[in-house]
Image: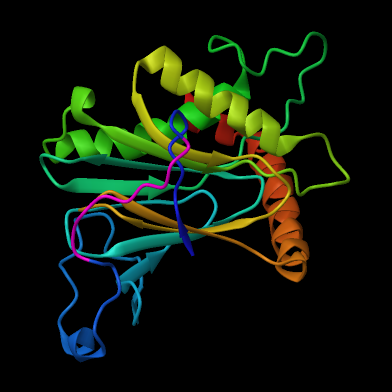
Amino acid sequence: MRSLVNPSTAVSDTRPGKPERVAAADAESAPPPQLPGFEHFERHWDRENGWTVKILPGEYYVTGGDEAISTVLGSCISACVRDPQRRVGGMNHFMLPEDAAVGPNDWLNPGAGLATRYGSYAMESLINDLLKLGAARERLEIKVFGGGQILAAMTDVGGRNIQFVRNYLTIEGYRLTAEDLGGTQPRKVVYFPTSGRARLRKLRPVENRIISRHEQLYLESLGRQIAGGAVELFK
């Protein structure tokens, strides 16, 4: 698994600090306490990454402890956000619903586009929880991943997700410190909020098919939720 690439300099993110590989002897150490509202997330011990939380599409996780957050991305996007001074951070995992509007495509219009409201909800849920912990908007460091074109039978869902997250960060004035977006391969991402390190591994074609199927089902579930009135969540 390789380090993330800085979008402007295209050099490996090699910050000095304690390596993420954890000695097997540390496996008996107690996990850090979970923040209120995130106690339902299960954690497992990983010999390489230590205590690790896995998040799925539609989820996000925030921590101030020494633990990692992992996810697997195809067309979806994950934003990894932290305040280096407060040493709190988190990760989300989201996909924009398809635009079912009749007429001109307005999915990026903040006033009318459902997709934008959905993506903004995913970003603001994560960021607002960090602000409650004392993080400051001007100190936030953000890394983004995903947006692969892996749903071959559909329009470029990954490309729309990338367009959204870049547009959102620009409009809101947040600082993007690194990214790995696009392409045709899914990614496994592991993020360490207290240090800001991120590790990335591109997955094999057989894993691509599995992730494509899962994301297709998730996209269909978004459509059903919206048809059933879940749009109220994003107002």
Please tell me which residue is depicted at 61% across the width and 34% down the height of the picture: 229
- Position of residue 126 measured from the top left corner of the image (x, y, whole percent): 34, 39
Left or right: 172 in relation to 156: left
Residue under the image location 17 percent in, 41 percent down: 84
Query: Can residue 232 be spotted in the picture?
Result: no
Residue nearest the viewer, comparing 92 with 235: 92
In the displayed structure, 27 sits above or below 118; it is below
Residue 148 lies in the magenta-colored region: no
Magenta residue check for 11: yes
Is 229 positioned to the left or the right of 37 in the image? right
State the predominant SS element of the stretch in magenta: loop
Task: Give the residues in magenta.
Answer: 10-18
Left/right of residue 94 with respect to residue 13 in the rendered view: right
Indicate the position of residue 28 as horizontal and vertical percent values: 18, 89
Residue drawn at (77%, 25%) of the image: 100
Residue 221 appears in view = yes
Whole-percent x and y of residue 80? 38, 44
Q: In this view, does 78 lie to the left or right of 142?
A: right
How many marks on residues? 0
Q: In the displayed structure, would residue 127 be above or below residue 211? A: above
Which one is nearer the viewer's eye here, 35 or 50? 50
Please tell me whether residue 73 is drawn above or below residue 227 in the rendered image. Answer: below
- The picture quadrant where one finds residue 17 is bottom left
